[in-house]
Amino acid sequence: MKNLLRKAIIATVLLVPFLAKGQLVTLKGKENSHAGQELVFYKHSDLITLTEEEVGRCKVSKKGDFSCKIKITETTFIYATLGVYKAYMFAEPGKAYELILPQREDKTEAQRLNPYFRETDLHIGIANISEADINFATSQFDALFNQSFDEIVEKTYKGELTLSIDSIINTIENLFTSNTNSYFHSYRNYRYGLLKQLTLYQKAKSISNEYFLNQPIQYNNTAYMELFNLVYDKYFIHFGRTLAGKAIFDNISQQRSYSALKQTLATDSILANDTLKELVILKSLYGEFFDDEFSRSALLAILDSLYFSTTIPEHLVIAENIRTRVTKMLPGFVPTQFELKDQNGKPKSLNSFKDKYVYLNFCSTTSYTCLQDFVLLKKFYDKHKKFIEVVTICIDNNENDMQVLLKNTGYDWTFLYYGNKPELVKDYDVRAYPTYFLIGPDKKLIWSPAPSPREDVEVRLFNLLRAKGEI
């Protein structure tokens, strides 16, 4: 009860700045090629997990006009996926922007079905923008910085660099000193730190001391967090190889003790600041979930201890995001819930299949492997449908493709159309088609991913049910 009360207090504290200082931002414009489309704008709720958080959406009229409002408390990096582009900008509280969107270019079918396809980053154009605006400033700075950066890296590795890094940075900085925007000032500063880090001009410890140890943490500044993520990448492993840090492995894997871990990390001078130390721990925990150095259960135990002890609202958000990201597809946890329309237009969710196992799969009617599997799924379903439900989420670009398949084949298990909701594919970490999952009657994942019908799924399912005493 005390922990719940404490979290409610922290959550309230976290909301206060939004309730007190949040200001509306207007985003409007006209682009005929987006007519009839819905524009959805996102931000990252934290810049470690990069968890998406929707901030606003609007429908583009038949004439190409659009207008929507979002609410933010500080300068915020926002973006929208527009076909093959990830269009981004920096929004400042209380401002109105007339956006110049790129002409729409939809993804090809191959691009849409490729889980590894990444949209091209594009800074959104803004009409009647002043040179003092942060979007104009960052765009100009990035163009100059990236050109200089590429040349510096190339010459550094060839041993041909004749000017010092500081001289090059001063030359660039002199062009922007008149801009007094505090976000932009920090943005430039941490971009310079990134240059020093990547060219090995300064060692990681020196970068940490100069840019992070005695500096305010800028959770929402993209340049700050980019350098932070680079400097402290795999920190547990690197520090764990030192004499002072070797206890890290016992602290996590054996003791599962957050307090012991903090005591070990306190011996590293670069983490003398407690707030920075806690943020580095969060960053490191998240990174290690995707490596094999520590057990996931041990990492979760440390994360939960941090979650229930932190007094920093931003760290509470990051901890929640980490736990959601790393557990949602683990066996024993409840996966992302959804409600989609089936082949008859009726809404269906995982809760629609009470007291049954669900053999869930993501497929496309344009995938030859999926079409082959459907034949096997038909036999599997007819044989086991008394206790297991086969559910196919169809990720075709057009719902009619699914309907045509069902009309021509007569497949009678549940087909759901994902409704052009790419977030569902991301939520289930689908990287190939088909991908399968087995979900128990308690709605928790059993196999993630699950074997396909071509991989002895019947034998494994029989052994599972026999072990549970259900057959």
Image (spheres, rainbow, N blue to C red):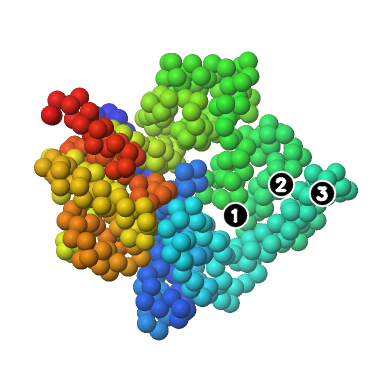
Q: Nearer the viewer, residue 162 or 91?
A: 162
Residue at mark 2: 195
User: Residue 453 location in percent, x, y?
Assistant: 29, 43
Residue at mark 3: 155
Residue drawn at x 63%, y 50% as measured from the top left: 186
Amino acid type, mark 1? Tyr
* Circle 2 or circle 3, nearest the eye: 3
* Circle 1 or circle 2, nearest the eye: 2
Query: Mark 2 vs mark 3: which is more N-terminal?
Result: 3
Q: Secondary structure at mark 3?
A: helix
User: Residue 358 location in percent, x, y?
Assistant: 21, 43
Q: Nearer the viewer, residue 51 or 265?
A: 51
Q: How many numbered marks does the figure carry?
A: 3
> Residue pushed farthest bottom?
63
State the separation of the CA atoms marked 1 and 3: 30 Å
The vertical placement of 75 against 453, above or below, is: below
State the separation of the CA atoms marked 2 and 3: 13 Å
Point out which mark residue 183 bears. Answer: 1
User: Residue 315 location in percent, x, y?
Assistant: 44, 38
State the separation of the CA atoms marked 1 and 2: 18 Å
Query: Mark 1 vs mark 2: which is more N-terminal?
Result: 1
The vertical placement of 312 against 54, above or below, is: above
